[in-house]
Amino acid sequence: MKTFIQAENVSVKFRIYHNSAPSLKDAVVNRLIGKKNRDNFTEFFAVHHISLNINSGDRLGIIGLNGAGKSTLLKTIAGIYSPHEGRIAVSGRMTPLMELGAGFDPEQTGRENIFLNGTLLGFSPAEMKDKEQAIAEFSELGEFLELPVKYYSSGMYGRLAFSIATMTEPEILLIDEVFATGDAHFVEKSSQRILQLVEQSQIVIIVSHSLEQIKNLCNRVIVMDKGVIIKDGDPKDMLAYYAENITHVSEKKK
């Protein structure tokens, strides 16, 4: 089966609420006098009319300033957000490396969360049983796997989440600012794991503020600004454009 991602005229909008909910007194008075509460919010497009074709072999980097829409676009591709306009078609099994551990149950042990998080990633209990030992060994948490994760340090939490999320064979790999957590040994080991996944995957999409990472891993880059794609092309050309026109820091000044 051919692996691809197609986005057609995709828009995603959010609301910014300006005032808190009315007090009980105000609500009662407004109801008695027949005054309707008006929604006091502003809508804005985090992603606006984006069309994009990503095919097998693409190693796509997405760059832009904070608020440019990078992560929103990636989460829409992953199915976390639904487009308000347009459509996204995906062919291939996705592995999202973003917000790792978001589905953990703090009351359950690390081992129990292996199966819980695996289910959220689309794996059956039998499949996770096959992966359990490898995940346990990679995380290096030992007997702490029998402890509820609410007692984990941030480093332990990150190590378990990373070990679960990367114990896959992805066709499409989505990476959003994933940085290794832990000591130097685990940082090096997890960095090598990401490189292996990138090599194994048919499509890779990376959102990162590390331009060096984008330069080293990607063969195509899009530049986003205010929810739209303003440039799409060769990494060297796109990084130069980004430095000169978006961050206004030329390569000569670096």
Image (tube, rainbow, N blue to C red):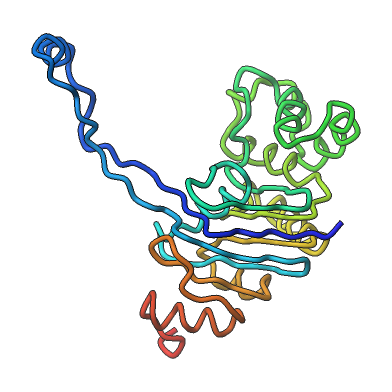
Q: Position of residue 105 (x, y in %)?
A: 62, 23
Q: Nearer the viewer, residue 149 or 200?
A: 200
Quadrant where the image shows the N terminus: bottom right
Q: Is residue 99 left or right of residue 15?
A: right
- The answer to whether 162 is drawn above or below residue 176 in the figure is above
- Number of marks drawn: 0
User: In the rendered image, is residue 91 in sight?
Assistant: yes
Name the residue at 56% across, 76% down.
Answer: 232
Left or right for 171, reference 160: right
Residue nearest the viewer, comparing 8 with 205 = 8
- Which residue is pictured at 83% across the width and 50% down the height? 169
| Residue at figure coordinates x 75%, y 47% from the top left | 166
Residue 107, percent from left and from top: 62, 17
At a point 54% along the width and 43% down the height, the residue shown is 82
Closer to the camera, 55 or 201?
A: 55
| The C terminus lies in quadrant | bottom left
Residue 157's spot in the image, x, y percent?
62, 35
Q: Is residue 136 left or right of residue 227?
A: right
**In the displayed structure, would residue 106 be above or below residue 1?**
above
